[in-house]
Amino acid sequence: MVNALWWYRHQLGSLIRRVGYDPRWKTVLAVSPDKTATDSKCWPSGFALWPQGDGNLGDRLERVFRISPVGPILIIGTDVPDVAPGHIERAFRGLARHDAVLGPSADGGFWAIGLRRLQSTPKGLFLGVRWSTSHALEDARDVLGRRLPRDRIGYVDSLADVDTVDDLG
């Protein structure tokens, strides 16, 4: 547990240094549990902290999309060592052409999900996604295709995420 926490803190710090201060987008940290959004000093200063709320990953993603102002938003995982500003830029460019973008990961999940959001996010957007499985990307694509105004989903770079210690090496 201590090694995992150490890795995560260093990974988050590295991610923030690489993409968090880029002036082309506003970085917000969606944190969990909610209490850490207001009570913890462990998060980097200078960033808005939004509580993710309860529920599975889909519930928490939907909540972040729903509390965001209308307009393009990209949510990325913090467990992606190779994400760089160019990946984020390409995802936002994709949102200029598509209603949604997904950044696949090799394990069948995704490291990034973005919505163009010309209107508020529909409730239950991610119902039916089998989170933390090799089906997550496919399921997310399917539910987005059924629920968004237009069935236009783009893809950005495939990157590896870190779910277990075996993914590090």
Image (cartoon, rainbow, N blue to C red):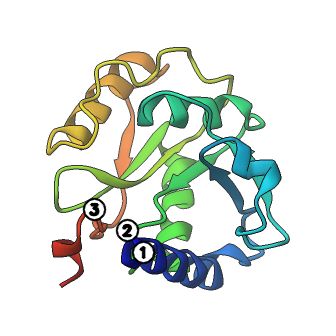
Is 74 on the left-hand or right-hand side of 120?
left
Depicted 145 relative to depicted 39: above or below: above
Question: Along the polypeptide, which appears first: circle 3 or circle 2?
Answer: 2
| Amino acid bearing label 3 | Asp
Give residue 83's position: percent from left, percent from top.
44, 76
Give residue 127's position: percent from left, percent from top.
37, 18
- The residue depicted at 43 percent of the width and 79 percent of the height is 7
Spot the residue most to the front.
Answer: 2
Instruction: Find disc 2 in the rendering and name its residue.
Output: 1
Q: Quadrant of the C terminus?
A: bottom left
| Amino acid bearing label 2 | Met
Is 124 on the left-hand or right-hand side of 159?
right
Instruction: Find disc 1 in the rendering and name its residue.
Output: 2
Give residue 150's position: percent from left, percent from top.
44, 24
| Amino acid bearing label 1 | Val
Q: Quadrant of residue 130?
A: top left
Q: Which mark is residue 21?
A: none
- The residue depicted at 56 percent of the width and 69 percent of the height is 89
Q: Quadrant of the N terminus?
A: bottom left
Q: Which mark is residue 163?
A: 3
The Cα–Cα distance between marks 3 and 2, rounded to whole angstroms, is 13 Å
Give residue 12's position: percent from left, percent from top.
55, 74
